[in-house]
Image (cartoon, rainbow, N blue to C red):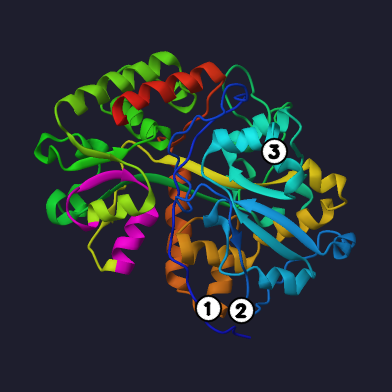
Amino acid sequence: MKSNEKSRRDVLRITGATAGAGVIGGLAGCTGSGGAGGSSDESSGDESSGGESAESGSSQTESSSESVGELNYWGISTTFPSEWTPFTDESGISINGQTAPWRQGQVINNMVRGSAASDYDVVNMDVTITRPVAEQGAIVNMDVESLPLWEETYEEVKTNGPTATDYNGDREWDVDAETGDQWAMTAVQNGDSVGYLPEYIGDPSTVSSYGILFDDEFNGKTSMEAGWATAFTKVANYLKYNNLADISTLDIQIPTEESIDTVMEFMLEQKDDGQFRTFWSGWESAVNLLASGEVWAMGTWEPVVFALRNDQNIDAQYLTPDEGWSLWGEAPWMTTGAVEQGKRDAVRNLVNWMIDGYYGAEMIELRGYLPASARGIQYAEENDGYDAEFHANRHELVRAKLQDERSVYGYNFPDPETFQYVNSQWSRLSG
């Protein structure tokens, strides 16, 4: 049976702070721009749901979840489907959705020192900060392998390193290590690079490097994020793979002060030469800079390009970089508060549902982000309002990003001091 066509919300992104493993102390008030998405509004806001129901077909995780009437959900706005009604129709559980900021330091503090772990049952956030919130007792192990649909998740989801709660060795993530349990399921993921205007930069067949951001030909017409999160990864990879600096992949994934200094020296030289028109912050700013032609190429998030194409009919492209993608993912956590209130099975039911078809189809259609399984492709084929061919192509494209050996998950920081250091150094650029 086909469902009625649903309305589509605009693709949004948000700015925020980043923090990595073990970063707890001294993060209050520290912000940097991240790359997962949502709205630029930092305050929490209600997300209403409604509209037509849809058949999901996912299994109930536990029958006891039926006694739970509502789950309180706090997540990046790009993790929200058009409506939660299909889950409610299937489970009898309503979702009270609140928008979380893409500010990892702020989220960690709210989870560990604030009341988020008791106020919310599910928190959907940056996978790279799973370890610190787990270490501090704010979340509990999801036991993802026992979810009914877990076996159908992509291999990239099953082996997502940053969802592990321990390091294997000094500074390496490894889900399969004896001490590296995987605590969360990656609901959506993607790789970030550069949005550009072919009219000025060149035909996409000839453009394949982050170097367009630093090319003298485009002096004063490029832009970088005001925050350092995905921007650091892109610049560091550019320097490494073009033999412009001696920097290791590990020192990009989990930066040291030395690798931060290497990137900063290069970026300050570029700034002094007038390479950058501006350091942008906020969704509307990124879209408007490219739409007006004030900027021709910028390190940004892929939905910015979606918005330019779909909403303004502008020929914008997203770079497939020789140097690799800046990877990120978002995972729903089960809070300690949910367990204390007897909602463990209800949370697992929701997470299992997020592996299924409706949610997967929504994430591709609204964001272009890879969901946890291929079920969304079949859902798109069987239901109106979705472009099934686009879905299949996006699954293939994003999986290729995640499998690219040059691509890395960035912004993991082993201690508060390193986090503070990169935050203060990057502010020299954008401040």
Extent of the magenta region:
291-311
Of the residues under marks 1 and 3, which one precedes in the sequence? 1
Along the polypeptide, which appears first: circle 2 or circle 1? 1
Q: Quadrant of the N terminus?
A: bottom right
Residue 145, x across and y down, in percent: 75, 47
The residues bearing labels 1 and 3 have C-alpha atoms spaced at a distance of 35 Å
Q: Nearer the viewer, residue 223 or 195?
A: 223
Q: Amino acid at mark 3?
A: Gln
Cα separation, mark 2 vs mark 1, equals 8 Å
Label 2: which secondary element: loop
Q: Residue at label 2? A: 51
- Residue 292: say if magenta: yes
Res 182 label: 3
Q: Quadrant of residue 49?
A: bottom right
The three-letter code of the residue at mark 2 reads: Gly
Disc 2 crowd, CA 10 A, few/some/many (<14, 14-19, 20+)? few
Dividing the picture into quadrants, the one containing residue 312 is bottom left
User: Label 1 near label 2: C-beta < 8 Å?
Assistant: yes
Q: Relative to residue 278, is residue 317 depicted above or below?
A: below
Is 336 situated left or right of 274 in this image? right
Q: Secondary structure at mark 3?
A: loop
Residue annotated with mark 1: 6
Classify 10 Å Cα crowding around label 1: few (below 14), some (14-19), many (20 and above).
some
